Image (cartoon, rainbow, N blue to C red):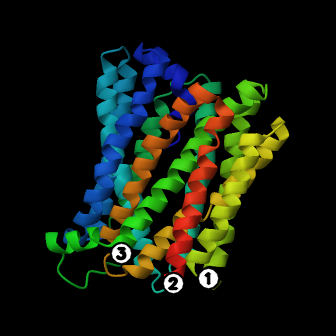
Amino acid sequence: MFLPGPCLTTMAATFDVPLARLGLIFTAFSVGLIPSVLSMGYLSELVGKRQVLLGALLALTVGWGLFAFVSSLGGSRSFPMAMGALVLVGIGGGGIEVLTNALVADDNQPTPGFALNLLHAFFAIGAVLGPLGAAAVMHAKLPWHLMFYAGAGLFAMMFLVLLPQRGPDRRDAAFDMAAALELLRSPLLLALLVVLGLYVGAEVGLVAWVSPLMEEVLGSARAAAGMAVSVFWVFMAVGRVAVSALAIRFRPAPLVVALAVGSVLACLVVAWAPTIVWCLVGSGASGLFMSGIFGLVMTDAAHRFPHRTGAAFGLVAAGVGVGSLVVPAAMGFVGGLGGLRTALLIPPGLMAAVAVIYLALWRR
């Protein structure tokens, strides 16, 4: 999922479009992702999680394969087709987002916290290794679309590995539209959706704008500016492994509150960093404290809706798409008006809201 970033300038030349227009590829991904996380969760309760997970893997295989093929054609006419392929990738990505969490939660009841946080540590590892792999391909001057053929091949391999498996499927009662509407009316589930949207918006916004802050405000070289994102994800991976151990001993609510408060302080260090070193320190601390929040929110949802994990996770994960769509763009707007330091005050504000909401849930 993180392969396109290092390739954007090369992609612009391949598609013969301005670099600014390439932001549409992320929009196309979100166009597929947001309805997918909602529908995949509902569908998994009707036909089973295993079938939907396999379908998501097929969508990713075909989507990345089409994206690579269309990209190899080149020219501006291929750009709309490439965006269409990325909508399919978003659909498959939404299925992976919901179903991996739901299946792991089902397989580790009644205490899924350790497994869910460990699962998300691998997301952070991929976020580090994906861009490094893309950079290596660029450095070797190989065609960039080969990476996406390779990605399609990996997803196809995973499909074949999982095809004979029989995963746990916790469907204890018939699921219909009435049951889905009952979930939608749950104030707790909506609160978890808001929390996840705030958290993901803070995370994506910080990752998107910390490098420009280092380059334009602190005077960092471009290569060093990119280090802030790598430092963030390295500490994110470390933190998720650490939170996996903590999740065995502590309930999700106090852990989320503590991590959210730590995230506020770490993000403020980034926004107010006087030097490049302090910005890197703040980026690492932000990754460390933000690390466990996603897995802990999913753990909380699994505890409270143990027999509807697919549908519950699908609704909660809708916050992922909303947060990632709204916050980075809003930060860009604020940065244009008041400067990047002002824009980077938004993530700590969002994490403060996460702490307040979860403190209220904890008290209840």
Q: Note whether residue 100 is visible.
A: no
Answer with the quarter of the image where residue 9 lies: top right
Q: Position of residue 59 (x, y in %)?
A: 30, 48
Gap in angstroms between the C-alphas marked 3 and 1: 23 Å
Q: Secondary structure at mark 3?
A: loop
Task: Locate residue 190 relative to residue 347 in the image: left or right.
Answer: left
**Circle on res. 167:** 3
Q: Earlier in the sequence, mark 3 or mark 1?
A: 3
Q: Does 169 appear above or below 288?
A: below
| Residue of label 2 | 111
- Residue 16 is drawn in which quadrant? top left
Q: Are marks 1 and 2 in contact (CB under 8 Å)?
A: yes
Q: Residues within 10 Å of mark 2 (few under 14, many from 20)?
A: some
User: How far apart in space, not on screen, are marks 3 and 2 (Cα)?
Assistant: 17 Å
Say if 339 sits above or below 47 in the image.
above
Q: Residue 318 location, x and y as percent?
A: 37, 56
Per the rendering, the mark at residue 248 is: 1
**At 31% from the left edge and 60% from the top edge, which residue is drawn?**
54
Return the residue nearer the eye: 54 or 165: 54
Residue at the spot 56% in from the left edge and 66% down from the top edge: 356
Categorize mark 1 by other alpha carbons within 10 Å: few (<14), some (14-19), many (20+): some
Q: What amino acid is found at the position of numbered circle 2 in the picture?
A: Thr
What SS does tag 2 mark? loop
**Residue appearing at x 62%, y 29% in the figure:** 338
Amino acid type at image mark 1: Ile
Q: Earlier in the sequence, mark 3 or mark 2?
A: 2
Which percent across, then down, holds residue 183?
27, 72
